[in-house]
Each structure stands twice: as C-alpha cells, then as structure tokens.
Amino acid sequence: MSDAAATPSTTPEGLRQADPRTLEITWQDGVTSRFDVRDLRLACACASCVDEWTGEARLDPESVPSDVHPLRIETVGRYAIQIEWSDGHATGIYPFRRLRALDGAAAGPSPPER
Ligand SMILES: [Zn+2]
C-alpha cells in the first residue's frame, strides 16, 4: 500500500492540541479539522482494535475511559501520526488521508477558508 501521492488536502501544515479534548489539524489546502480525542481513540484501526480479516470492530467503546487523551503524538514518515494514549494503547497509526476522511464524514464538506 502506498501513500506517496500526498495532496494538499491530506498534508498537514500544523497539528496541535487545541484543548485537552480536541486535536486540531490544519491542512495545506487551508482547511482546519478538529477531532474529539476520544472519537479518534475509538476510530483506531490497528489490529487489536479492528479484526484484520473481517474488518469487524474489536474495541469495546465501553472499555475506553471518557477522559482518554493523547500522551504523545509522533509523526510516522510523511503520511501518518501515531498516538500514545492515556489508556496504554499505542499501536494505532492514523494516516493523514484517513484523518481527513474522518473529518469529512463528521462535518460534511467544509467551506473553503481562503
Ligand atoms: Zn488500536
């Protein structure tokens, strides 16, 4: 799988924790995405959260504390971030393309900001 074809809409210009519950990503196309950190934790697509074969969710949302938050966020190459969570989970990788798609799904098409 190749993520080489990065576009401005899937390339972050900035990433910051806007507040303890919100992760904010600014994209090169001028759009800002805001993510509830617990939603991101629940959207984890690693092998222990999602069954690799069936695509079925293995993560029980009930098992994720309501105050879960990132302890550490690291970039993975040029295409993704890896988040170490306060509940001890650290294997999830969030490709920028997927984050952008998650935001689109939650908020609908964003109006251009410039
Ligand atoms: Zn996971």
Image (tube, rainbow, N blue to C red):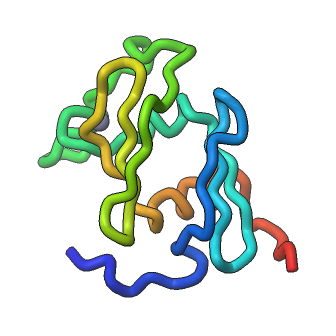
- Residue 35 vs residue 81, the one in the foreground: 81
The x and y percentages for residue 113 are 85, 73
The x and y percentages for residue 83 are 39, 41
Q: Residue at x 16, y 46 (%)?
A: 52
Q: Residue at x 39, y 57 (%)?
A: 75
Residue 83 as seen in the image, left or right of residue 68: left
Q: Quadrant of the N terminus?
A: bottom left
Q: Is residue 47 above or below residue 95?
A: above
Quarter holding residue 98: bottom left
The x and y percentages for residue 62 are 43, 13
Q: Residue at x 51, y 57 (%)?
A: 99
Residue 47 as seen in the image, left or right of residue 31: left
Q: Is residue 68 above or below residue 11?
A: above
Q: Residue at x 63, y 57 (%)?
A: 25
- Residue 13 vs residue 38, the one in the foreground: 13
Residue 82 as seen in the image, left or right of residue 13: left
